[in-house]
Amino acid sequence: MLLIFSRSSFSMADLNDKLLALPIDLECAQHLEGGPEASFYLKFNDVTLQSMGSYETDFNEKDSNDIFMPLPNVIGIIKKTE
């Protein structure tokens, strides 16, 4: 699984072109969300990464969002220990 988060604003066609041009043999993708509603949070051992989307046409047409919005959907992954 490859999770890609981009804070930059792209049309879906432009983002698709950029992803398909990568040398990773990408065959399919699923767009989940964009704009300020999109967020990325990763915590693994001592590493924490967090970012939130910002620009969205007709809603938030600036790149100044610096807060997480409420999360209606979450993808969580845990390592099962035995």
Image (tube, rainbow, N blue to C red):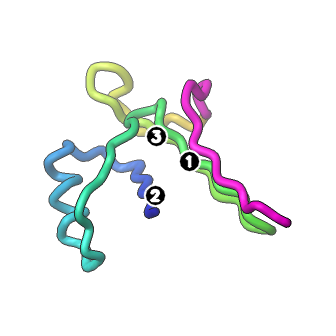
Q: Amino acid at mark 1?
A: Phe
The x, y position of residue 53, in whole percent, is 46, 40
Label ID, residue 58? none
Q: Residue at 85% of width from left, 66% of height from top?
A: 82
Q: CA distance from mark 2 to mark 3?
A: 15 Å
Q: Which residue is mark 3?
A: 53
Tell me if mark 3 has few (under 14), some (14-19) or many (20+) residues whose alpha carbon lies within 10 angstroms of its own.
many
Real-space Cα distance between discs 1 and 2?
A: 9 Å
Q: Is residue 5 above or below residue 23?
A: above
Give the residue displayed 55% in from the left and 31% down from the top: 73
Label 1, on which residue?
Answer: 40
Q: Amino acid at mark 2?
A: Leu
Q: With 77 as the anchor, is 57 left or right in this view?
A: left
Q: Position of residue 39 (x, y in %)?
A: 53, 41
Residue 51 within the segment the image draws in magenta: no
Circle 2 is placed at which residue position? 3
Dot 3 amino acid type: Gly
**Circle 3 SS class:** loop
Q: Between residue 42 and residue 80, name the one nearer to us.
A: 80
